[in-house]
Amino acid sequence: RIAQGEPATPGYGVAGAGFSSVALPMPFLASHDASITIRAGVENIFNLLYRTHLSTLRGMIRREPGRNLFVSLSLAL
């Protein structure tokens, strides 16, 4: 269901892909059982324009952004 006054759309599909490494040991840090995990990926691979009706930013953002790339690093001590 959409909000009152919001135009209906036929729906959308968005493709994404990513990967996450296994925990890589980091014995040279202060904690000898420390490790890091690396993650990376892409959202909206085909760079499609779409509208999220359940967004809490309904009045400010009309269309979702295009292709997004991300990289993250997690450190466990």
Image: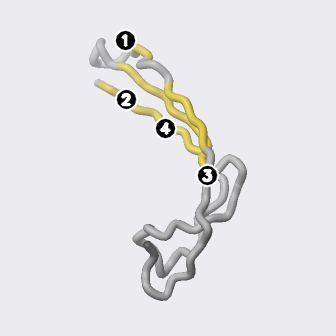
The image quarter in which residue 17 lies: top right
Q: Which mark is residue 75?
A: 2
The kind of secondary structure element at disc 1 is loop
CA gap, disc 2 and disc 3:
30 Å
Residue type at mark 2: give it: Leu
Residue 53 position in % (x across, y down): 49, 70
CA gap, disc 1 and disc 2:
12 Å
Residue 37 position in % (x across, y down): 44, 26
Residue type at mark 4: give it: Ser
Residue identified by numbered label 3: 14
Residue type at mark 3: give it: Val
Left or right relative to 38: residue 67: right
Disc 3 + disc 1, Cβ < 8 Å? no
Of circles 4 and 1, which is in front? 4
57 and 38: which is toward the camera: 57
CA gap, disc 2 and disc 4:
10 Å
Residue identified by numbered label 1: 27
Of circles 4 and 3, which is in front? 3
Q: Quadrant of the N terminus?
A: bottom left
Q: Earlier in the sequence, mark 4 or mark 3?
A: 3
Question: How many residues crowd mark 1 within 10 Å: few (<14), some (14–19), many (20+)?
Answer: few
Color encoding of the figure: secondary structure
Residue type at mark 1: give it: Pro
